[in-house]
Amino acid sequence: MEMRLPKAGTIEIVPSILSADFARLADEIGAIESAGVNMVHLDVMDGHFVPNITIGPPVIARLRSVSNLVFDSHLMISEPAEYAEAFVRAGADHITFHIEAADEPRKLIDKLHELGCTAGICLNPETPVERIKAVAPLCDMVLVMTVHPGFGAQKFMPEAAKKIAQVREIVGPDIRVEVDGGIDAQTAPVVVSYGADTLVAGNAIFSKSDPVAAINAIRHAVQ
Ligand code: DX5
Ligand code: ZN
C-alpha cells in the first residue's frame, strides 16, 4: 500500500471537519478540495479519553468514497491499538494516537506501518515533550496540541505551542510537525516560526461563510 502523507518540506493547511456541517460532510470536503488542500483532519473522539463523541470507522469509510484527500485521522480514544486496524480498513491514510493513551507506543507505530499507514503521536498541552522523545523519530508526523482535546473553537495556548520547537529539535527536518487547536491567520505564523509545517484548523475555516477564502487567508499569513 502506498503511503500518502505528503513528504516533509511543504506547509500543509489541514482543515478539521469537526467544525463543518455534519449533515453535509461530502459538500464541505468538496469545498476544501477546491481550495487545493492535500489533507483533511478527521477528529475521532470516544467519550472516554476526551469528554466528547464524534465519528468512527463507518463515517470515515463513507467519506473515503467521496474524497481522495489524504485522511489525517486524529484518534482521541483510549486503547488506540484495539481500533487501529478498523480505521486503516475504513480508509485512514495517517493515524495519530495520543501518548497519554498508549501503553506500547513503539509497538503501535510498527503495527500502523505494517498496515500500510503512516504513524503519528500526539501530546496534550500538559504532557512534556520528554514523554515522546524515544518514539517521535519512529513516526512520520508528531502532533502538538495547543488546546485541550475534545472540542473545536477553543483559545490557542501559547505556552503549549512552544513545545513545537523542542519537537522539531528531536525529529529534525524529515518528519512532519503538526499543530492542532486555535490555529487561524494570527496564530499560524507563530507556530510556523517554531517549526510546525502541518497546520490543522477547524473553526477558522468551517465557521466562515467562505471556507476557501479562509484557507487562503491562513496560507497568505504563513507565506
Ligand atoms: C480538538 C480537535 C481539533 C479541532 C481543532 O480536540 O482535535 O482538531 O478540530 O479545532 P479549532 O481549529 O477550532 O481549534
Ligand atoms: Zn484534531
Image (spheres, helix red, strand yellow):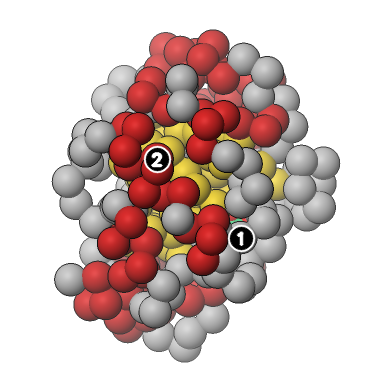
Residue at 24 percent across and 64 percent down: it is 36
Residue 205 locus on image (x, y percent): 45, 75
The mark that comes first in sequence, 1 or 2, is: 1
The quadrant of the image that shows the C terminus is bottom left
At a point 32% along the width and 32% down the height, the residue shown is 171
User: Quick check: can you spot residue 89?
Assistant: yes
Q: How many other residues sit within 10 Å of disc 2, few (<14), some (14-19) or many (≥20)?
A: many
Q: CA distance from mark 1 to mark 2?
A: 17 Å
Specify few, some or many for label 1: CA neighbours under 10 Å numbering under 14, 14-19, or 20 or more: many
Nearer-the-camera pick, 151 or 222? 222
Marks 1 and 2 close (CB-CB < 8 Å): no
Q: Secondary structure at mark 1?
A: loop
Amino acid type, mark 2: Val
Residue labelled with disc 1: 147
Q: Position of residue 166 (x, y in %)?
A: 40, 43
In the rendered view, would you say 91 is above or below 154? Answer: above
Amino acid, disc 1: Val
1 or 2: mark nearer the eye: 2
In the picture provided, is 150 more to the left or to the right than 120?
Answer: right
In the rendered image of this protein, does residue 206 appear above or below residue 40?
Answer: below
Whether disc 1's CB lies below 8 Å from ligand 1 is answered yes
Determine the secondary structure under disc 2: helix
What residue would you read off at disc 2?
Answer: 167
